[in-house]
Structures are given as structure tokens and as C-alpha cells.
């Protein structure tokens, strides 16, 4: 059987025209996930400057999911795979850019025109560059009235012969969807719906009247499909059809009505061939007063995030850097957003959320030899904001992230104290509960160590139910990292982990104390945790729950802990990619997976000598936040750990839960 799949020789000749950027080249060489992005959405799909901001947003979404974006376009007789800011600006602002399908590649090269690539040409170029995953809005297909015009998109032809996975929202709504799905089946193209139902999406709306080959909610299954197809030598592409997120589908009917009207107008005005799609998109945007463009951008971003996760999994690499941000991100005016969920701060390229308790801390500090004799000792009492989730939210905010906090406070004096001390955090989602006191915590600090603490959190924590998570599921679904605080009630933890697992989010578990380690295991979803940071006693409890017998003396040194983890890695690490055991003045034991998925072991020294420690409260939270911020700003795991150490060191020297010396400058 004759196939037009590119041979090694053809790739070599084709590569003469390829200009692959250094970041893309390095990612491919290191076996990292890479996602191709087409550029007609920039040149012909959206108006300036929306096209530029969207192009940058799509790249950030891919980075946030742990992969390297590779926007493809033609400039000056070369095919560029991966564009810097200057080239993106040039592409977005061009008035003379041409639309480049497969047949147009040669013409655009010889004329040295600026060209935006379609689905068809992007697939061809991506395959030549060694990229297996491609994200777009919707693919082309069989046009309405094709029985008279023979108008069938070249996208379908390339899908039938190029083994690239195209992550999209189905077929553009202006096309004949049933005939397109039938064409895909006839030409042996894998056609999969990524969702709960096997209903092929209709671009702006979640459902059409057609079915795909099958549906799945597991990207792992998609990975197996792609690998099996490759191993079997099947030369066909794969369509991964992703329904637009539910919250953006509400306008689908009105947009569809506008599409129908625009299609009629195109026919009446004899608009055909490559001019049809740009005309209809522009007309629909006009008829819907911009609603269609907003929805279009939303589905593009959703597809880019899914493609990023798929590409990372396809390379057998679970990215610790949930948010692989561009080092020049600050120049683009975009901050990583942080959402903290009660004990959990979650991060993504754009969304990091914290949901949890807002706690007002009181700490009694003394350097005297305290005895259990009922006596009074000289010292001081300080008041500050605290709470694991809130601490993370503040530290991430201080590190330059846009930090969103979801929580509850009481309508009392302590609640007011929280509001006036949250300038680094977005607290618009914090609700006020009447007749419930704001959570408070009293710590007794003797010579730099907290001997014990007393917390009054149960009355308010009881108001934090799974409904709170469900009400904020939108921010969870668009996030890529969750820092989960074990102070949460088990049902709330279970709901959080359930959503995280379903949407394949990274989860950092902060155990908080011995008894609360058990909570995550009791949810039955501990395999959803991808990073954790127990202290010595919490680690011993973790090992016990993993059925690993451990001598308590093992936590006397980081090296001993690392030896144990290496020996029992299958049982202790579970599904984690980053495991940090903090051992106070003995330092920390760190196990993490490198870019190739291999385990690396590292002993970290203590951040600060004990005689210089003022208070340990919040130091662990500052460490975690430093690591997360480092990862979201495209630093390596080692660099991120160093940043975490510095944040912990600064907080250890203050009575505050998060040092005011923690600033974005630390990232430099």
C-alpha cells in the first residue's frame, strides 16, 4: 500500500527549511513533551492585539502543563518551529500574512512571505520536526454542500497519513460534522472524545449529533493508543476531541444561530475556498458582539492545556514543574496565579489557588528553660496571620504570583485582622460566616522550637464542606497544581483529590501533623498526591501507613532516610514525583524525578543554624512556596529547592509566618 507518510529521507530534505528554536530543540533532545501550535489563529483567526495575547496565553498553557510550546510559522523562506516574542509580534501585527496549507508551503517559502500555518501544514511540519502532539481550536472538514463543490479540507487528508495527535474541540461548527466524522472513519483516523460521553463536540457547543470511535477520561489511555499505533506501524493520525468547558458552553446556541446566518451570507456573497472560514469567524464575532471570540479563546486555551499534559505523559515524564513558565514572563505582564485551597495552594501557569482556613496566630516566645511546673516565664507574645493555606498564599504572592485565596472567616475582630493583613493575596473569594469565630492558634515557642499548640478551628472548619470545592471547581479545573493541607475535613480532601485526579492535576500534600497524615490515606485517593513534604514524625507515620517497618532512629539523618526510601521506593513514594522529608536541624531528605523520569536523591542542609532561629512557624510553608514558585518560573528542581531553602531561611529569622523579605527578586 502506497503511503505519503514522510520517510526518513524525506524528513531530511524537508528539514533543510526548518528553523527549530533552541528551547524546542533542547526539549526534543531531552525527551521532554513538546506541543505544536498552528498560527492561522494568529494571522487570520483573531484581530490584533487579541491574536498576540492569545498566542502567548496558549504557549503559557502548554508550559503550565509541563511541556514546551512550538508555535509554527513561515518567515523569510524558512519554516520556524518555536517563536520568540519578536516573531510572535511580527506575525500578529502583519497585514500581509498568507494562509499556508500543505500545498502553499513551497510557494510561501520561495516568495519569502509571512505565513500562518493551518492544521494540515502544521501537522506536516510538526511530524518533520519530531513533534507528536498538536493543539488547535477545531479541525477543518467536509464543507456543507461538498457533494456539489467537492470542498473538503486538506486537514482530513493529512490526518489520514501523518501520525500526529491533534487535540481540538472537534470540527469547526460551520462544516458538515456527520460527513467529516464519516470521512475520518473511512480513512482510518483514530477519533476519540476526551470526556464523559461519546458525543463528538461541535466546537462552540459540547455536543453534535455524531459519535466518535470511543471516549475516554484518561490521558494514559490516549498515550497507550498512540504508542500502540506507532508500534504497529499504523501511519494514521489521531483526533482527540475535547468538548469546550461547561461554563463556556452556555452561549453555544446563540453562537450557532449566528454561524448559520454567517454561512447563508457567505453563500449569498459567493465566498469560497480559503476565504470562507475567516469571513464566517469575523461575521459571527460581529453578530455575537464579541462573545464568540471569548469562547473561541477559552476552547483554544483548554485544548492547549490538555495537549501539554498529553505530550508530557507521552514522553514518560511527569512534570514536577507544573507551570513551566517562560523566564521572560515578567516582561509579558503575566503573573502566575495562585489559588490556595484550604491547605492547599495550587499553582498553574495562570491559576494557583489556595482553599483553606484563615487562622490568626498567637505565639508565646521564650528563651528560658520551661518546666511543667505551672510557673510563669519571661518572654513575649506576638500576633500574626497564619494557617498553612494562607501562609502559602501569602508567600506565593510575595514571590510575584497572583495568589487567590478561597476560605472563610468569622464576622469578628480576628476576621477584621485577617482582612487588613492580606494585601499580597486576592481574598475576594473569602466568605464571611456569622456566628462562627475566625480560626485562631496559640503556639508555645521555647528556644526556637514550638513545643505544642492549641487551635480553635473546628467551629469554622465545619462550614468547609465538599460544596465549597464544587462551587470553586472552575478554578481547580483550570489549575495545574494543588497544595493540599491535611487540616481539611476528610470529605473535603476526598472531593479535592477526586477533582484533581479526574482532571490530572498535580497535588502537593502538606501533612501538618502525625494524626492528620492518616486523613489522606482514609480518602482512598492517596495515589492522586504527586508531591509531599512530611517532617520526621509525619514521615514515620507515612511509612507505617505504607506498611513499611521503620526504626525511629532512621530520621536522625537525611542520608538514612534517603537509604530507606531508595530501598522501599515502590511502597513509600507511591505516585509522587517529589518527596521531601524535613528533619529540622538535621536538614532535609529530597527525592525527585528528573526529566527522564529517573529518581534522584539529595540531602539538603538546614536552612539556618538553630542558634539564629527566631521562630519555626511558617518556615515549611515558605519552603514549599519557594519550590512551587521556582518551578512555575521555569527553574529546575534543584534551583527551586534552593529558592525554597532561602525562603525558609528568611522566615526562620522572623516572628512572622512569612518573612516580608521574600520578594520576586529572589527568583533572579
Image (cartoon, rainbow, N blue to C red):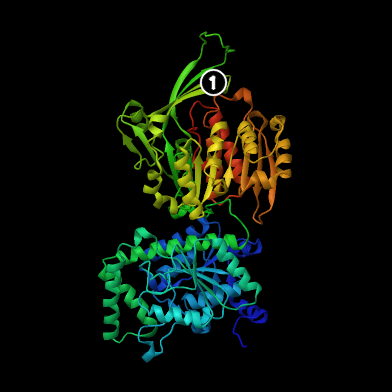
Pick the front one: 64 or 110:
64
Q: Is residue 215 left or right of residue 571?
A: left
Q: How many marks?
A: 1
Q: Is residue 50 left or right of residue 389?
A: left
Q: Is residue 237 left or right of residue 466?
A: right
Across and down, in percent, residue 454 comes to: 48, 23
Can see residue 149? yes
Query: Looking at the rendering, in which quadrant would you find the N terminus?
Result: bottom right
Residue placed under numbered mark 1 in the picture: 445
The residue positioned 66% from the left and 33% from the top of the image is 587
Query: Looking at the rendering, in which quadrant would you find the C terminus?
Result: top right
Mark 1 element type: strand
**Rendered view: 659 above or below 192:** above
Can see residue 68? no
Task: Quadrant for residue 228, please give it.
Answer: bottom right
**Rendered view: 664 above or below 609:** below
Across and down, in percent, residue 21 comes to: 58, 66
The residue positioned 73% from the left and 36% from the top of the image is 560
Across and down, in percent, residue 67 comes to: 56, 59
**Mark 1 crowdedness (10 Å alpha carbons): few <14, some 14-19, many ≥20:** many
The extreme bottom residue here reads: 148
Pick the front one: 445 or 78:
445
Across and down, in percent, residue 456 comes to: 42, 26
Pick the front one: 495 or 288:
495
Amino acid at each position: 500500500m502506497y503511503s505519503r507518510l514522510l520517510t526518513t529521507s524525506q524528513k531530511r530534505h524537508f528539514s533543510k527549511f526548518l528553523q527549530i528554536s533552541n528551547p524546542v530543540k533542547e526539549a526534543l533532545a531531552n525527551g521532554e513533551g513538546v506541543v505544536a501550535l498552528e498560527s492561522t489563529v494568529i494571522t487570520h483567526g483573531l484581530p490584533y492585539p487579541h491574536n498576540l495575547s492569545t498566542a502567548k496565553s496558549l504557549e503559557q498553557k502548554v508550559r503550565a502543563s509541563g511541556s514546551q510550546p512550538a508555535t509554527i510559522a513561515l518567515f523569510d523562506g524558512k519554516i520556524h518551529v518555536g517563536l520568540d516574542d519578536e516573531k510572535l509580534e511580527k506575525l500578529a501585527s502583519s497585514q500581509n500574512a498568507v494562509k499556508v496549507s500543505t500545498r502553499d508551503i513551497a510557494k510561501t517559502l520561495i516568495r519569502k512571505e509571512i505565513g500562518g500555518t493551518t492544521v494540515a501544514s502544521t501537522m506536516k511540519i510538526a511530524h518533520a520536526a519530531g513533534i507528536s502532539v498538536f493543539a488547535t481550536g477545531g479541525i477543518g472538514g467536509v464543507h456543507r454542500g461538498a457533494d456539489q463543490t467537492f470542498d473538503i479540507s486538506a486537514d482530513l487528508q493529512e490526518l489520514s497519513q501523518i501520525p500526529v495527535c491533534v487535540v481540538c474541540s472537534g470540527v469547526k461548527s460551520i462544516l458538515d460534522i456527520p460527513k467529516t466524522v464519516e470521512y475520518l472513519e473511512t480513512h482510518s483516523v483514530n477519533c476519540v472524545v476526551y470526556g464523559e460521553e461519546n458525543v463528538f463536540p461541535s466546537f462552540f457547543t459540547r455536543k453534535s449529533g455524531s459519535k466518535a470511535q470511543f471516549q475516554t477520561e484518561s490521558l494514559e489511555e490516549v498515550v497507550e493508543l498512540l504508542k500502540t499505533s506507532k508500534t504497529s506501524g499504523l501511519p494514521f493520525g489521531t483526533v482527540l476531541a475535547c468538548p469546550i468547558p461547561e461554563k463556556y458552553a452556555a452561549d453555544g446556541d446563540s453562537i450557532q444561530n449566528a454561524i448559520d446566518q454567517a454561512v447563508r451570507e457567505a453563500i449569498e456573497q459567493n465566498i469560497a475556498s480559503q476565504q470562507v472560514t475567516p469571513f464566517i469567524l469575523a461575521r459571527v464575532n460581529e453578530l455575537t458582539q464579541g462573545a464568540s471570540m471569548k469562547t473561541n479563546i477559552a476552547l483554544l486555551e483548554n485544548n492547549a492545556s490538555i495537549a501539554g499534559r498529553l505530550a508530557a505523559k507521552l514522553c514518560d515524564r511527569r512534570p514536577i514543574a507544573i507551570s513551566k513558565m517562560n523566564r521572560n514572563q515578567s516582561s509579558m505582564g503575566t503573573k502566575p496565579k495562585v489559588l490556595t485551597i484550604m491547605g492547599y495552594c495550587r499553582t498553574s501557569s495562570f491559576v494557583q489557588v489556595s482553599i483553606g482556613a484563615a487562622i490568626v496566630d498567637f505565639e508565646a516566645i521564650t528563651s528560658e528553660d520551661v518546666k511543667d511546673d505551672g510557673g510563669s516565664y519571661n518572654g513575649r507574645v506576638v500576633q500574626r496571620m497564619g494557617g498553612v493555606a494562607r501562609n502559602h498564599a501569602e508567600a506565593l504572592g510575595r514571590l510575584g504570583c497572583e495568589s487567590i485565596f478561597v476560605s472563610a472567616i468569622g464576622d469578628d475582630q480576628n476576621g477584621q485582622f485577617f482582612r487588613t493583613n492580606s494585601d499580597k493575596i486576592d481574598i475576594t473569594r473569602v466568605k464571611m460566616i456569622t456566628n462562627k469565630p475566625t480560626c485562631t492558634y496559640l503556639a508555645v515557642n521555647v528556644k526556637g522550637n514550638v513545643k505544642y499548640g492549641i487551635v480553635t478551628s473546628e467551629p469554622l472548619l465545619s462550614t468547609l464542606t465538599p460544596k465549597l470545592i464544587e462551587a470553586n471547581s472552575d478554578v481547580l479545573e483550570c489549575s495545574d497544581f494543588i497544595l493540599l493541607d491535611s487540616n481539611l475535613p476528610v470529605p473535603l480532601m476526598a472531593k479535592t483529590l477526586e477533582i484533581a485526579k479526574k482532571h490530572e492535576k498535580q497535588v502537593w500534600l502538606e501533612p501538618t501533623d502525625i494524626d492528620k497524615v492518616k486523613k489522606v490515606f482514609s480518602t482512598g485517593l492517596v495515589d492522586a498526591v504527586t508531591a509531599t513534604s512530611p517532617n520526621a514524625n509525619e514521615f514515620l507515620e507515612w511509612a507505617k501507613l505504607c506498611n513499611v517497618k521503620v526504626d525511629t532512629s532512621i530520621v536522625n539523618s537525611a542520608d538514612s532516610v534517603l537509604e530507606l526510601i531508595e530501598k522501599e521506593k515502590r511502597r513509600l513514594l507511591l505516585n509522587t514525583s517529589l518527596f521531601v522529608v524535613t528533619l529540622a536541624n538535621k536538614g532535609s531528605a529530597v527525592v525527585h524525578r528528573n526529566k527522564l523520569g529517573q529518581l534522584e536523591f539529595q540531602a539538603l542542609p538546614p536552612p539556618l543554624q538553630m542558634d539564629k532561629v527566631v521562630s519555626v512557624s511558617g518556615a515549611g510553608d515558605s519552603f514549599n512556596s519557594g519550590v512551587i514558585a521556582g518551578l512555575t518560573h521555569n527553574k529546575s528542581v534543584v534551583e527551586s529547592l534552593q529558592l525554597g531553602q532561602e525562603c525558609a531561611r528568611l522566615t526562620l529569622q522572623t516572628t512572622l509566618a512569612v518573612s516580608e523579605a521574600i520578594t520576586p527578586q529572589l527568583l533572579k
